C-alpha cells in the first residue's frame, strides 16, 4: 500500500460522491496502490450509509464509524492510526482541499521529504473576519510557542510512515494536530494552492468553536500565558505598592481628606479583574491537566467496514 487518504466526515452526505469520483480520477491513473479511510464522526445525516455503499462498490474505501461526534482532531487521529500506507494524506470531505494536488505531494515525498505541507495562497468563500482572525492566530501562536507552526496550512499535507509512527507514540488526549505535525519535525517542504469554497453543506466551525480551537492550540503549545499572568500580577502589585507609598506620603503632608472613594474603587476593581484573569489562565491549563490525567481514549470506534486483514471487518 502506498497512499492512505484520510477523510474525517461530519454530515458530508452531499459531498461524498463527488469526493470519491475526484479522488479516483486522480489516484487510478497514478498506478499507486491506494486506500481511502473515511472516518464518520457522529454524522446525523446519511453520511454513514453512503460510505458503506461506497465501500461495497470499491473495497479500497475503508469506513470507520466512531461511536459519537468526537471532533475533527479525534476523527483525524482515528484515520491516521488506521492508515496502512507508506504515506498518509488527510483531506477535508468538503473538497476544499483539491485531490488533484495529491500527485504533487507524492512527487515531493519521493524526493525524500517526510512532510509535505499544502499551503493556502487564498481562501475563497471565507469571510474577511475569518481570514483576518486566522492570520492573527498564526502570528500569536508562533510568537508564543517554541515550535514553528506553518501559517495557512490546514491538515491537508502528506505525512510519511516514520512521521505516522511517531505521531502514534504521542500520548496526549487533547490533540491539536497542526501543532503535533509541526512538533515532530522531520524533513518538510511546502507546495502552494488556492483554497476553494466548500462544495456543499455548511461549515460546523462557528467563531466560538474556532476560538476554542485557538485556545486549545495556544495552551497545548505554549506556557507563555501562564507566565504572563504572573508577570502581570507582579506589575500590578508594584504599581499598587507605589500608589500606596504616595497615598501615605500625601496623608502625612496634607492630613486626611475623606475623599478616597474613587481611588479605592479603582484599585479594588482593577486588582479583582487581574486576579480573575490570572485564575482563568490557570484554570485553562488545569482543565487540560485534568483531561490528560483521566487517560481516556481520544476516540471510540463503533464499527469498521473494510476488506481483509482485520477480524473486525464486516464484508457482508
Ligand atoms: N469534521 C469532523 N468532525 C467535526 C467537524 C468537522 O470530522 O466535528 C470534518 C468535516 O466533515 C470536514 C473537515 O472536518 O471534512 C473540515 O470541516 P469544515 O469544512 O466544517 O471546516 P472548515 O473547512 O470550515 O475549517
Ligand atoms: Mg471546510
Image: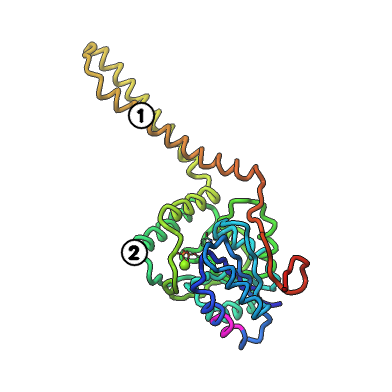
Does residue 120 sit above or below 220 in this rendering? Answer: below
Name which of mark 2 and mark 1 comes first in the sequence.
Answer: 2
Relative side of 156 to 64, left or right: left
Q: Estimate how packed mark 1 is, as few (under 14), some (14 to 19) or many (20 or more) residues with alpha carbons within 10 Å.
A: few
Determine the main secondary structure of the stretch shown in magenta. Answer: helix
Front residue (pair 311, 49): 49
Residue 236: x percent and y percent? 38, 31
Residue 74: x percent and y percent? 59, 58
Q: Which disc is residue 33 wearing?
A: none
Residue at point 59%, 83% (across, down): 24
Relative side of 255 to 40, left or right: left
| Disc 2 and disc 1 in contact, CB within 8 angstroms | no
Q: Which disc is residue 128 wearing?
A: 2
Asked whether residue 291 is drawn in magenta, I would say no
Residue furthest bottom as drawn: 29
Asked whether residue 23 is drawn in magenta, I would say yes
Q: Which residue is labeled 1 in the image?
A: 239
Cα–Cα span, label 2 and label 1: 40 Å
- Position of the N terminus, as image quadrant, is bottom right
Relative side of 184 to 203, left or right: right
Start and end of the magenta stretch?
A: 22-27
Amino acid at each position: 500500500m502506498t497512499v492512505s487518504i484520510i477523510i474525517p466526515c461530519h454530515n458530508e452526505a452531499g459531498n461524498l460522491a463527488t469526493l470519491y469520483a475526484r479522488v479516483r480520477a486522480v489516484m487510478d491513473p497514478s498506478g499507486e496502490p491506494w486506500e481511502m479511510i473515511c472516518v464518520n464522526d457522529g454524522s446525523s445525516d446519511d453520511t454513514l450509509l453512503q460510505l458503506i455503499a461506497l465501500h461495497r462498490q470499491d473495497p479500497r474505501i475503508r469506513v470507520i464509524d466512531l461511536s459519537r461526534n468526537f471532533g475533527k482532531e479525534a476523527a483525524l487521529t482515528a484515520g491516521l492510526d488506521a492508515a496502512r500506507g507508506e504515506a498518509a494524506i488527510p483531506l477535508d470531505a468538503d473538497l476544499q482541499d483539491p485531490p488533484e494536488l495529491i500527485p504533487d505531494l507524492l512527487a515531493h515525498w519521493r524526493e525524500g521529504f517526510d512532510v509535505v505541507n499544502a499551503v493556502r495562497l487564498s481562501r475563497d468563500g471565507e469571510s474577511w473576519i475569518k481570514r483576518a482572525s486566522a492570520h492573527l492566530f498564526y502570528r500569536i501562536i508562533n510568537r508564543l510557542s517554541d515550535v514553528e507552526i506553518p501559517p495557512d496550512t490546514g491538515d491537508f499535507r502528506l505525512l510519511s510512515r516514520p512521521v505516522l509512527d511517531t505521531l502514534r507514540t504521542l500520548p496526549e488526549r487533547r490533540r491539536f494536530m497542526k501543532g503535533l505535525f509541526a512538533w515532530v519535525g522531520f524533513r518538510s517542504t511546502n507546495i502552494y494552492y488556492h483554497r476553494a469554497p466548500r462544495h456543499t453543506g455548511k461549515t460546523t466551525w462557528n467563531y466560538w468553536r474556532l476560538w476554542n480551537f485557538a485556545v486549545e492550540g495556544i495552551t497545548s503549545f505554549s506556557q507563555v500565558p501562564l507566565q504572563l499572568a504572573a508577570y502581570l500580577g507582579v506589575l500590578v502589585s508594584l504599581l499598587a505598592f507605589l500608589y500606596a507609598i504616595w497615598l501615605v506620603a500625601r496623608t502625612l503632608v496634607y492630613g486626611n481628606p475623606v475623599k478616597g472613594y474613587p481611588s479605592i474603587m479603582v484599585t479594588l476593581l482593577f486588582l479583582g479583574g487581574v486576579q480573575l484573569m490570572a485564575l482563568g489562565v490557570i484554570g485553562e491549563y488545569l482543565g487540560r491537566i485534568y483531561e490528560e490525567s483521566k487517560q481516556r481514549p481520544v476516540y471510540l470506534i463503533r464499527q469498521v467496514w473494510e476488506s481483509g486483514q482485520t477480524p473486525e471487518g464486516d464484508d457482508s
